[in-house]
Amino acid sequence: MAEVRLVNIKKVYPFVSGEQKKSKKKKADEPEKKKVNLQITDEGVVAVQAFNLDIKDKEFIVLVGPSGCGKSTTLRMVAGLEEISDGELIIDGKVMNDVAPKDRDIAMVFQNYALYPHMTVYDNMAFSLKLRKEPKDVIDKKVREAAEILDITQYLERKPKALSGGQRQRVAIGRAIVRDPKVMLMDEPLSNLDAKLRNEMRADNTTFMYVTHDQTEAMTLGDRIVIMKDGYIQQIGTPQDVFNHPANLFVAGFIGMPVMNFFDAQLVRDGKKFFVEVGGIKVELSEDKEERLLKNDVQSQAITLGVRPEHTDVADEGVKATVEVSEMMGSSVHLHLNAEGKDVIVIVPTIDMKGNFNIGDTVHFTFDGKVAHVFSKETDKNLEF
């Protein structure tokens, strides 16, 4: 088991020969260009930048973000499969930048399984232990214990080609488990596995770094979540923290399903009180939100207001909206509305419904001040933090 620290980590992919010459020479006062949302500098393409993270022993950390945000590159730098351009990787107090991958005591499970096709499941799982020259009885015990946990004992004598995708994933995970590594790295390997096994992996006494683009998976697995975009960390926090207190518009829109509703609104400060005005209604923010805004000396201004669909309520009075789609989801109805020129989703529990919602109906909705999120129009940052 191990503590892991990533200190100001940076990854730059240098230009291939001749590539830089093809690009126009940058003027002294010209800002750095971006390509596919990544920074382009004289050094090359910057994939990860200013990455700082302290991971506790046995903590399960999930890196989440859209494709190309740098999460897999970060994982590969920890594994030693990518060179660290700048910064330090420290595991158990030892700087690992120049340590060979095989000497880092790290196991990595890839998305594509990377199993040896000519070996049986048993031999795939036992391979690393045989290289260590572990006693045969120890190897057998570790392999069979892992196979039992992963429910693949019946497949130990089969070759990978005879297994389903989910079964191959289990073998790849088992191959990593038997090594008893200090750190387990996983690049989206659990997508086909059931919830029970995910929970078993989550409860294992190992330090985990797990990469996914699926925010639901991140929320259910992680002790803490690292949300990334364009090579930068956007926010680090527990699933509850990032859901209840998103640091900026990107996090607010990325975490949560259905996605958060956003409105052009006005934040009004009246002494020590704060209100949001939208669609003809005025809602006072909760005391804790007011305290944070006061601490930051926030003044009245135009804002982007965020309210999650599950935190909105259909009411007799409120923001006026028109029903565009009504989706029955069993325990609730998802109303897709047009309000204030925006597409809005309101979730109505079926137990609270007084009738059906039809396309074209006029409805009103409101929300409580404790669930309203206020974002700067200039910086996209949450004005509370």
Image (tube, helix red, strand yellow):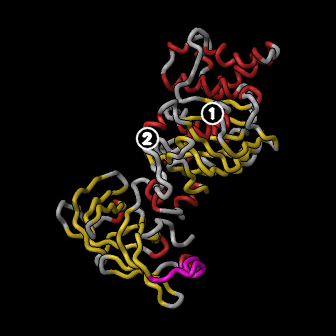
Q: Position of residue 128 (x, y in %)?
A: 72, 19
Residue 200 in view (yes/no) = no
Label 1 SS:
loop
Disc with the residue nearer the chain's start (1 vs 2)? 2
Residue denoted by label 1: 82
Q: Quadrant of residue 153?
A: top right
Q: Is residue 49 above or below residue 373?
A: above
128 or 380: nearer the viewer: 380
Element carrying mark 2: loop
Density class for disc 2 (Cα within 10 Å; few <14, some 14-19, many ≥20) is: few
Q: The N terminus lies in which quarter of the figure?
A: top right
- x then y, percent, for residue 30: 46, 56
Residue 231 highlighted magenta (yes or no): no
Mark 1, other Cα within 10 Å: few <14 / some 14–19 / many ≥20: some
Give coordinates of residue 192: x percent, y percent. 49, 32
Which residue corresponds to mark 2?
23
- Indicate the amino acid at tag 1: Glu
In the picture, residue 308 is in which quadrant?
A: bottom left
Give the extent of the magenta segment: 290-300
